[in-house]
Image (spheres, grey):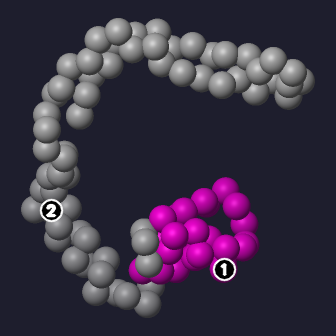
């Protein structure tokens, strides 16, 4: 983990009319916060809830795919595919 201080700039494209900008950070100071990767810390109640969800394996996939994009109606196969891609399965 790093802390970067600097200037965030949006650089306009020279011959583009799309309104897209290339962005960059001109860093002038870096500070190392930690050299190890951050690992999540789960409470005992969270672990218990995750294990309870995992017991109902047949319902779990449907429940998670429905909650992935609740405002999108239908497209269940696409939601399941996106969910598997997000979770690495």
- Looking at the rendered image, the quarter that the C terminus falls into is bottom left
User: How far apart, in angstroms, are the residues tagged by discs 2 and 1?
Assistant: 32 Å
Q: Is residue 66 left or right of residue 43?
A: right
- Where residue 18 appears, as percent x and y from the top left, is 85, 28
- Where residue 45 appears, as percent x and y from the top left, is 15, 62
Q: Is residue 44 left or right of residue 40?
A: left
The image's mark for residue 77 is 1
In this view, 77 is above or below 18: below
In this view, 13 is above or below 55: above
| SS at badge 1 | helix
Check residue 75 for magenta coloring: yes
- Where residue 44 appears, as percent x and y from the top left, is 10, 62
Circle 2 residue:
45
Q: Specify few, some or many for label 2: CA neighbours under 10 Å numbering under 14, 14-19, or 20 or more.
A: few
Q: Examine the rendering and report whether any part of residue 47 can be seen.
A: yes
Check residue 76 for magenta coloring: yes
Q: Is residue 64 left or right of residue 52?
A: right
Task: Please give the range of residues in magenta.
Answer: 60-86
| SS at badge 2 | helix
Of labels 2 and 1, earlier in sequence is: 2
- Looking at the rendered image, the quarter that the N terminus falls into is top left
Mainly helix, strand or loop, the magenta region? helix
Q: Nearer the viewer, residue 62 or 8?
A: 8
State the residue at coordinates (23%, 69%).
49
Q: Nearer the viewer, residue 61 or 5?
A: 5
């Amino acid at each position: 983990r790093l802390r970067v201080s600097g200037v965030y700039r949006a650089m306009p494209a020279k011959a583009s009319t799309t309104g897209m900008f290339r962005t960059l950070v001109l860093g002038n100071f870096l500070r190392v916060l930690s050299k190890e990767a951050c690992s999540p810390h789960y409470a005992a109640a969270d672990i218990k809830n995750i294990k309870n969800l995992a017991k109902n394996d047949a319902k779990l996939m449907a429940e998670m795919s429905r909650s992935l994009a609740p405002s999108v109606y239908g497209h269940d196969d696409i939601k399941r595919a996106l969910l598997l891609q997000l979770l690495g399965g």
